[in-house]
Image: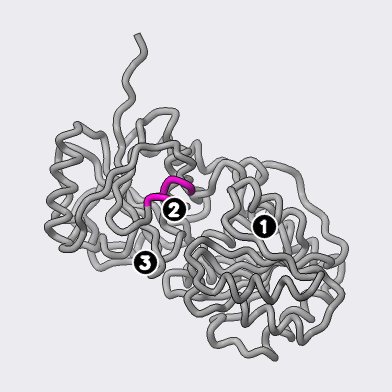
Amino acid sequence: MTDIKPIIFVRTDANNAIGMGHLIRCFALAKMLESSFNVKFIFTNTDELIANKFLENSYDSFWINGSDKLNEAEEVTNYVRSNNAFALILDGYQFDSEYQKKVYDSSFKLIYIDDLIYPNYFCDLVINQADILQERYKTNMQTKYLLGVRYVLLRPDFLKVAKDGLREINSIKNIFISFGGGDVNNTTLKVLKALLVLNIECSIHLLSGPLNQNSSEIGNLCSEKSTLNFYSNLSSSQVKELIANCDLALIPNSNLSLEACAVQILMITGITANNQLGYYNSFQANKLSLGIGNWDDASEDEIVASVKKIINFNSEEKNTQLLNQHKYIDGFSSERILHQINTI
C-alpha cells in the first residue's frame, strides 16, 4: 500500500495589480516539494485559467472569499486544519504580521516567502532568496530562516540548466526584453524605443505576460519590423530556451533575473518595484549584471548608454559576468529546501 503524502497548502495570488511573480515562485516551490508532499493551492483573486496554465494543471486549487483579510485568515486556518495539513505556505504582501499571527496554529507549520522585512514574524520558517543578514529579522518565536541564493525558488528547467557548464558569449546578436507578467508602467515599450533609437544590428525578442494590458501595442509595433520578435504566455522550458538563445537581457531584478542568471546571459537589470531592492543589491555586489537603478527613472539616454557599454565589453568583462552568474546559482536549492521543510 502506498503511503499517503502529507498535505501542504500554498496561499498566493496573481493578477494585474501584483503580477505573476508570487505564483511562479510558488509553483517552483511546489515542484521542489511534490516528491514528499501533496501540494494544493488556495486563491482569492486569481483568474482560474491563468492559475491552471502556470500550475500546468498539476495541483488541486481552491478559491475562497478574500474581501476581508482577517476573516480570510480564519477561513484559511480552519480549512488547513480540517484537512490535517502538514503546513501552510504564504506568499504575498497582504500576509503581514497581523495575518500571520491570526493564521498561526499549532496543528500545522507556517512558512512565509519573503522579499520585504516586516517588524515581526509569526511563522516557523521564512524563505528569502535575497542575500539578507538574519540579524535584520525580528521574531517572537524560534523561526528558522532560509536566506540567500542557496534557497532560490526556480522552476525545474532553470535549476537543471544552472548545473551545466560555463556559457560563452562572443558577440551580442540577440537581445531579450521582458518586464514581467503585468508590466503596469509599460517599461517594455520604453526600453524597446530606446533600443530602436540606438539602431544596432540585432534581433530583439520581447516577452510579455498574460496580464500585460499593453501587449497589443507592443505586438503591433513588432509586426512592423522584421528584427522585432514578440512572444506571449510561454512555458517555463520555452522561456529558458528563449533566454539561452539571446546574448543580452534587459530585465527587472525580479524572479526573472534569477532565472536569467541560472541560464547565464549578459544583463542590464534594475528595479520596477520596492520588493526588488534586495535582489538588485545582491546582483550589484556579486557583479552579476550592469545596474541601471530604477527602470522608471532611467532616461532614454541612460538606457542607450548602458546598452552601448555592455556591447563594448571586452572578452574578459563578458566572461567575468557570466562566470559570476555560474557561481551564484548552483542548481541545488531544491534539495536544500526540501530537506529544511522536512525537518521543521
Q: Secondary structure at mark 2?
A: helix
- Give the residue at x 14% y 40%: 106
Quarter occupied by the N terminus: top left
- Give the residue at x 24% y 41%: 109
Give the residue type that dot 2 points to: Ile
Q: Is residue 150 left or right of residue 327?
A: left
Q: Nearer the viewer, residue 195 or 170?
A: 195
Crowd around label 2: few <14 · some 14–19 · many ≥20 (10 Å): some
Q: Earlier in the sequence, mark 1 or mark 2?
A: 2
Q: CA distance from mark 2 to mark 3?
A: 25 Å
- Residue 118, position as x, y percentages in the image: 28, 67
- Give the residue at x 70% y 91%: 301
Q: Is residue 194 left or right of residue 313?
A: left
Q: Which residue is mark 2?
A: 50
Q: Nearer the viewer, residue 296 or 166?
A: 296
| Residue 93 is inside the magenta segment | no
Q: How many numbered marks have been drawn onto this rendered protein structure?
A: 3
Crowd around label 1: few <14 · some 14–19 · many ≥20 (10 Å): many
Give the residue type that dot 1 points to: Gln
- Residue 107, position as x, y percentages in the image: 15, 37
| Residue 123 vertical placement versus 37 (above, below) | below
Q: Is residue 333 left or right of residue 174?
A: left
Pointers 1 and 3 in contact (CB under 8 A)?
A: no
Q: Which residue is mark 3?
A: 116
Give the residue type that dot 3 points to: Leu
Q: Earlier in the sequence, mark 1 or mark 3?
A: 3
| Residue 237 vertical placement versus 191 (above, below) | above
Quadrant hosting residue 165: top right
Q: Which residue is mark 1?
A: 325
Please name the predominant secondary structure of the magenta segment in the image. helix
Q: Which residues are magenta?
A: 48-53
